[in-house]
């Protein structure tokens, strides 16, 4: 197997991939109205930030980026747990997971 290509992957490649992932997540947040898809899009955006942290950490030769990834992953897990719990609770009460439905609620 030719490993020359793998050795030529630089910081720019990681940053472009992270930017593409972030844009895909942002498009999911802005265009989709399903709560589950919204949470998955936010997780995709957080993972793109993690990729950026790891890429810069590798490029600079420091471990700070890797440590930040653990904090972001912890926050992402808490966000997913709370978000899914809210989504299940809302679905049980209103039988709806579309965001547009909740714009009309007052309270």
Image (cartoon, rainbow, N blue to C red):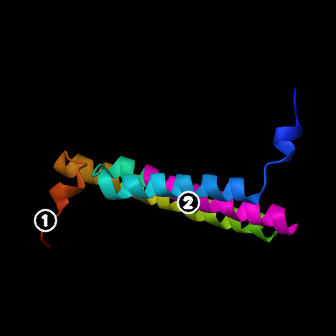
Is residue 39 shown above or below 104?
A: above
Residue 26: x and y in percent read 43, 58
Which quadrant of the structure image shows residue 106? bottom left
Looking at the magenta stretch, what is its main secondary structure? helix
Residue at disc 1, secondary structure:
loop
* Residue 13 colored in magenta in the image: no
| Disc with the residue nearer the chain's start (2 vs 1) | 2
The reply to whether dot 2 and dot 1 touch (C-beta < 8 Å) is no
- Near mark 1 (Cα within 10 A), the count class, few <14, some 14-19 or many ≥20, is few
The residue where tag 1 is placed is 105
Q: Residue at x 78, y 55 (%)?
A: 10
Give the label on residue 46, or none: 2
Quadrant that contains the C terminus: bottom left
Q: Which residue occupies the foreground of this view, 18 or 65?
A: 18
Q: Residue at x 74, y 60 (%)?
A: 54
Residue 58: x and y in percent read 82, 61
Residue 35: x and y in percent read 32, 52
- Mark 2 or 1: the one toward you: 2
Residue at disc 2, secondary structure:
helix
Residue 2: x and y in percent read 87, 30
Q: Which residue occupies the foreground of this view, 92 or 17?
A: 17
Q: CA distance from mark 2 to mark 1?
A: 29 Å
Q: Is residue 77 visible?
A: no
* Residue 49 colored in magenta in the image: yes
**Position of residue 26 in the picture relative to residue 95 (left or right):** right
**Position of residue 3 in the picture relative to residue 64 (left or right):** right
Region rendered in magenta: 40-61
């Amino acid at each position: 197997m030719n490993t020359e290509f793998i050795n030529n992957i630089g910081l720019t490649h990681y940053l472009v991939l992270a930017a593409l992932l972030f844009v895909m997540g942002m498009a999911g947040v802005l265009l989709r109205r399903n709560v589950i898809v919204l949470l998955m899009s936010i997780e995709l955006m957080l993972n793109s930030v993690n990729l950026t942290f790891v890429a810069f950490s590798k490029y600079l030769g420091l471990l700070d980026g890797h440590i930040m990834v653990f904090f972001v992953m912890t926050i992402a897990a808490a966000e997913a747990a709370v978000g899914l719990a809210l989504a299940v609770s809302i679905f049980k009460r209103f039988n709806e997971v579309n965001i547009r439905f909740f714009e009309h609620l007052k309270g």
